[in-house]
Image (tube, helix red, strand yellow):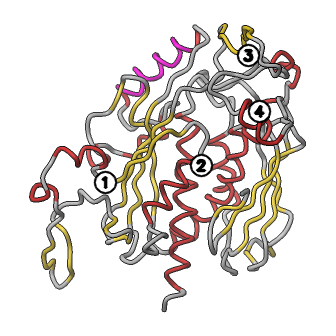
């Protein structure tokens, strides 16, 4: 279960404190000229140590491609790559070797496999998502050639949230602040809250919103390959994600069908809808409207304060975690949400081509 996708596939490997994180991308079309600077830029958006409200771990996160490229273009063969880990502080985790962190994967990994890498969480670490950002950056470039763009942003941190939809904000402002929120005033409030919580050794959760524009009609494979199910599965595979909703989501339960149906009309010879409560997907298939959704992230499980827990022998104990951890994953998770969205959309775009 280390491979994601149907036709455009990513197999990732590596652990947080191992030699490195890498992957193999299979099914990428041949002849795509890759912008290496863009790929590195996407990794830099996810990179640790980029601001005072993220983990201070310092990693260059430079990607090295091993195969699948010739003279800057994809060859259609597997694209192998690796990002070396250069800044592990494994000793920070010595006191966690025989102890289970509350709400962390420590217990489930130990029980499932009978062994676990306690250094940074090993394979359960969010550092694994760097491989997704490489594949997502490649998928983004291919999608852009076909007029499909993806933009995610932080819409809520703790109890501070944006009141409007993606249409109410200038999303080009997302990258102008450390929180990656398009509302600069709210972003400042969010940053202050994260800093306050961080100073107490605690953590915060929040919500990332995402919109994909230019998606053509017809992406989606009913009955069990619905596009929104694929997007939901992709988002829920990201560390700390606890919820996914697209379109009106849970708020649609408050209305009647007559109030929330997206009504069709003839728009100069093209069928269009007057509203987009469906979030760009109907019957599991894209309908040509903007696809928008929200992803809920829980507070980071590793907090730098004392907590009651048990050790590997089942004995009650107290743990105070050490190390370098994000007080809030939202800022660094924005590019990960975009990457997973890009991989899903490209995968389903390629699947749609097989029907013709």
Residue 354 percent location from the top left of the image: 54, 87
* Mark number displayed over residue 121: 4
Return the residue at label 1: 247
- Residue 187 inside the magenta-drawn segment: yes
In this rendering, would 241 be left or right of 121?
left
Return the residue at label 3: 310
133 is higher (above) or lower (below) than 59: below
Q: Residues within 10 Å of mark 3 (few under 14, many from 20)?
A: some
In this rendering, would 197 be left or right of 48?
left
Q: Nearer the viewer, mark 2 or mark 3?
A: 3
- Residue 34 inside the magenta-drawn segment: no
**Which span of residues is magenta-colored?**
185-197
Quarter of the image for the N terminus: give it.
bottom right
- How far apart are the alpha carbons under marks 2 and 4? 16 Å
* Mark number displayed over residue 237: 2
Residue at the image position 38 percent from the left and 63 percent from the top: 213
In this rendering, would 273 be left or right of 62?
left
Q: Nearer the viewer, residue 243 or 266?
A: 243
Residue 54 percent location from the top left of the image: 62, 26
Q: Are marks 4 and 1 in contact (CB under 8 Å)?
A: no
Q: Are marks 2 and 3 in contact (CB under 8 Å)?
A: no
Residue 67 percent location from the top left of the image: 84, 69
Residue at the image position 62 percent from the left and 58 percent from the top: 137
Q: Residues within 10 Å of mark 4 (few under 14, many from 20)?
A: many
Q: Nearer the viewer, mark 1 or mark 3?
A: 3
- How far apart are the alpha carbons under marks 2 and 3? 27 Å
In this rendering, would 264 be left or right of 167?
left
Task: Return the disc, 2 or 4, that comes first in the chain's sequence.
Answer: 4
């Amino acid at each position: 279960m280390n491979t994601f996708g149907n036709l455009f596939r990513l197999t990732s490997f590596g652990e947080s404190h191992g030699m490195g994180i890498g992957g193999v991308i299979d099914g990428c079309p041949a002849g795509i000229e890759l912008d290496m600077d863009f790929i590195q830029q996407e990794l830099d958006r996810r990179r640790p140590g980029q601001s005072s409200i993220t983990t201070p771990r310092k990693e260059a996160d430079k990607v090295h491609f091993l195969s699948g490229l010739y003279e800057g273009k994809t060859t259609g063969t597997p694209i192998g790559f690796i990002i070396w880990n250069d800044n592990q502080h494994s000793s920070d985790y010595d006191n966690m070797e025989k102890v289970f962190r509350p709400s962390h994967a420590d217990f489930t990994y130990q029980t499932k496999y009978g062994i676990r890498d306690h250094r940074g969480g090993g394979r359960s670490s969010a550092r694994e998502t760097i491989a997704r950002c490489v594949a997502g950056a490649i998928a983004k470039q291919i999608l852009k050639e076909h007029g499909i763009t993806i933009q995610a942003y932080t819409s809520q941190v703790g109890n501070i949230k944006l009141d409007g939809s993606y249409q109410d904000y200038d999303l080009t402002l997302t990258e102008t602040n450390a929180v990656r929120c398009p509302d600069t005033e709210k972003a400042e409030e969010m940053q202050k809250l994260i800093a306050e919580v961080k100073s107490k050794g605690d953590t915060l959760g929040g919500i990332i919103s995402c919109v994909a524009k230019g998606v053509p009609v017809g992406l989606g494979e009913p009955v069990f390959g619905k596009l929104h199910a694929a997007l939901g599965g992709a988002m829920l595979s990201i560390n700390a994600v606890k919820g996914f909703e697209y379109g009106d989501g849970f708020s649609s339960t408050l209305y009647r069908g007559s109030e929330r149906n997206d009504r069709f009309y003839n728009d100069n010879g093209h069928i269009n809808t007057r509203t987009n409560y469906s979030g760009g997907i109907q019957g599991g298939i894209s309908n040509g409207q903007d696809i928008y959704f929200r992803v809920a992230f829980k507070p980071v499980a590793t907090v730098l304060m004392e907590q009651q827990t048990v050790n590997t022998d089942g004995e009650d104990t107290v743990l105070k975690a050490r190390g370098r951890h994000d007080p809030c994953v939202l800022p660094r998770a924005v590019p990960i949400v975009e990457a997973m969205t890009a991989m899903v959309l490209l995968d389903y775009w390629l699947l749609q081509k097989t029907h013709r």
